[in-house]
Amino acid sequence: MHFAEKTVHINDNEFHFLSAANCIVTMSLPDKQIFKSILIFFDNVTLTDFYRKYDKKTAELKVKQKIAV
């Protein structure tokens, strides 16, 4: 995904929360496999509540998985 300030590479086994803004996504897809994508949109209140509720848990996961922020 390409953002104004950086590019992020995503693996097949990952998911990401994206903020509302401009984002360009490019993908390399195999010729003979079906591509599936699920997009779920949340309002800012819901996302803020999620981050507040699970802040400690997501911080632990980032450390365990060595996820770059």
Image (spheres, rainbow, N blue to C red):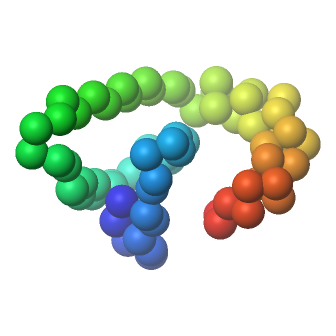
Q: Could you tell me which residue is drawn at 17 percent across and 47 percent down?
A: 30
In percent of width and height, residue 41 lies at 44, 26
Residue closest to the eye, 14 or 49:
14
The correct choice, above or below, for 11 with respect to 32 in the image is: below
Give the residue displayed 46% in from the left and 53% down from the top.
11
In the image, farthest residue toward the front: 32
Q: Nearer the viewer, residue 3 or 10?
A: 10
Determine which quarter of the picture holds residue 56.
top right
Which residue is pictured at 43% across the width and 24% down the height? 40
Q: Position of residue 42 (x, y in %)?
A: 51, 25
Asked if residue 3 shows in the view, the reply is no
Task: Tell me: 27 left or right of 48.
Answer: left
The image position of residue 6, as x and y in percent, is 44, 74
Examine the rendering and report whether any part of residue 54 can be seen. Answer: yes
Pick the residue in front: 66 or 25: 66
Instruction: State whether residue 35 is above or below residue 29.
Output: above
Residue situated in front as seen by the camera: 46 or 26: 26
Instruction: For the N terminus, give its image quadrant.
Output: bottom left
Hey, which residue is sitting farthest bottom in the picture? 5
Q: State the residue at coordinates (74%, 55%).
A: 65
Q: Is residue 31 above or below residue 5?
A: above
Please state the total of marks drawn on the protein image. Answer: 0
Q: Is residue 31 left or right of residue 69?
A: left
Q: Position of residue 25 (x, y in %)?
A: 28, 54
Apparent side of residue 44 relative to residue 26 in the rendered image (left or right): right
Q: Quadrant of the C terminus?
A: bottom right
